[in-house]
Image (cartoon, rainbow, N blue to C red):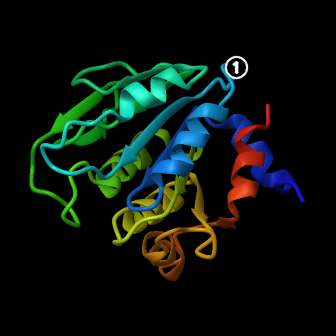
Amino acid sequence: MGPDKNLLERWRNADILLLGGSAGSFKLLFHIVKSLLPTLNKAVIIVIHRKKNFFSEIEKLFAENSRMSLREIVDKDTLNKNTIYIAPANYHTLIEKDGTFGLDVSEAVWYSKPSIDVTFESAAEVYRERCIAILLSGANQDGAEGLLKLKQSGATTIAQHPEDAEMDEMPRAAINIGAAQYILHTDEIFKLLQTE
């Protein structure tokens, strides 16, 4: 079964796709990056928890397998469509009202920097109903409050079905506070992201 008509319409009208994940989400994010079409016509922002001061090969691996332009976010970078942005380690990534990124060095949230909540909450203020956000597998509650703020601002919010998540605490936390409008199985997420 494919995504419902309302979700498809909201997907087509969105300017930005937010993807948040932690433990257990790397493989899924890798496959998402690999499958996104170069004609997506959206900016894609990935916030994934990583170890502090741990040199990451994520960008290289993702870039080599992406059909879209992909890069790690730098301060004051401008958001462009058909580009995948990855939040850097040791900073919180904020989306500014002028369509640029801001990097913030304040305290970790849920022991995480980058924090999914911080990015999601800033996107809620800027993109509102032109945003789709998906919260994936993770072992803490980061992202749940941010997803709720997005929903309240008019964005479309999705949680990975806990049955499919390697670590279900993160999507379950979002579902428990009513932050997810849609709870989708992994294959349903892929079907949505493949829709033109």
* 64 relative to 110, above or below: above
Quarter holding the C terminus is: top right
> In the figure, residue 143 lies in which quadrant?
bottom left
Q: Residues within 10 Å of mark 1 (few under 14, many from 20)?
A: few
Instruction: In the displayed orientation, state which residue is furthest to the bottom.
Output: 176
Give the residue at the far left of this rendering: 106
User: Which residue in the structure is indicated by mark 1?
Assistant: 39
Q: On screen, 40 above or below 23?
A: above
**Mark 1: secondary structure:** loop
Q: Image point 36% across, 19% down: which residue?
A: 78
Residue 97 seen: yes
Residue 123 falls left or right of residue 54 = right
Q: Residue 87 at what x, y percent from top left?
A: 32, 37
Total marks placed: 1
**Which residue is at a point 38% across and 25% down the rendered structure image?**
60
Q: Quadrant of the N terminus?
A: bottom right
Q: Residue at x 48, y 72 (%)?
A: 174
Question: Residue 141's image quarter?
Answer: bottom left
Q: Where residue 86 sits in the image (x, y, percent)?
A: 37, 34
- The answer to whether residue 130 is seen in the rendering is no
For the residue pair 3 and 63, the one nearer the viewer reads as: 63
Is 29 in front, or is 80?
A: 29
